[in-house]
Amino acid sequence: MNLFPYDTETLVSALSKEEVLSHLNRVTREVNYLDPRTQVKGDILFNGLIGQKGFRISKVVDRADTFLPLILGKIETTPRGCILFINYRLFPGALFFIAFWSVILLAFTAFYCFMIPNFSYATICLGLCIINYVVAMYFFNRQVKASRKVFHQLINFQMKD
């Protein structure tokens, strides 16, 4: 389990860069959440964008999930296939709220330690800060594991074709 909402991995594929991008493009859809027609699921596994040098995707989910990772990928061509550099990170909005509540709770901890000495309140605030962070990292790592599993199944399935 990582201590920060960030994870990386490197995958080597026998497929060419163009084949990997083509396969990813088949199961990825750019979604406009204001237009219900773009939200049809079907065979789509990921939401996001596929470019010439890489991709920016996230797993398709049925309900909102704050800790769903954003998968950023860069693909390098090699003589015998390609190398995928994958980064998993929290969406900026989720990262903002975790940081916001951590800073607020740490500020209250400092306030109750130094300004108005009340160590029981300081301990409660520090405990809540730690619990907030641990729960966030637990759910993020759990979602990374699920997203990684879907991505690996996709790559392995495509390599058999």
Image (tube, rainbow, N blue to C red):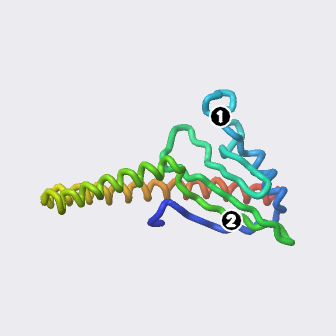
State the residue in front, 131 or 150: 131
Which residue extends farthest front? 115
Residue 122 horizontal side relative to residue 140, left or right: left
What label does residue 129 carry, if any?
none
Residue 112 in the image: state x and y as whole percent: 18, 57
Decide: few, some or many residues near mark 2? Use Cα within 10 Å; few <14, some 14-19, many ≥20: some
Residue 38 in the image: state x and y as whole percent: 68, 32
Residue that numbered label 1 is attached to: 32
Q: Sequence-wise, which precedes: disc 2 or disc 1?
A: 1
Decide: few, some or many residues near mark 1? Use Cα within 10 Å; few <14, some 14-19, many ≥20: few
Residue for point 65% across, 49% down: 57
State the residue in front, 12 or 33: 33
State the residue in front, 148 or 10: 10
Which element type, helix, strand or loop, lies under badge 2?
Answer: strand
State the residue in front, 79 or 142: 79
Distance between mark 2 and mark 1 Cα atoms: 27 Å
Q: What residue type is labelled 2?
A: Phe
Residue 78 horizontal side relative to residue 32, left or right: right
Residue 121 in the image: state x and y as whole percent: 17, 55
Residue that numbered label 2 is attached to: 85
Quadrant hosting residue 34: top right
Residue for point 70% across, 40% down: 30
Which residue extends farthest bottom? 79
Q: Which amino acid does label 1 sit on?
A: Asn
Which element type, helix, strand or loop, lies under badge 1?
Answer: loop
Q: Does the residue at mark 2 contact the one at mark 1 (Cβ under 8 Å)?
A: no
Q: In this view, does 111 lie above or below 82?
A: above
Quadrant of the image for the C terminus?
A: bottom right
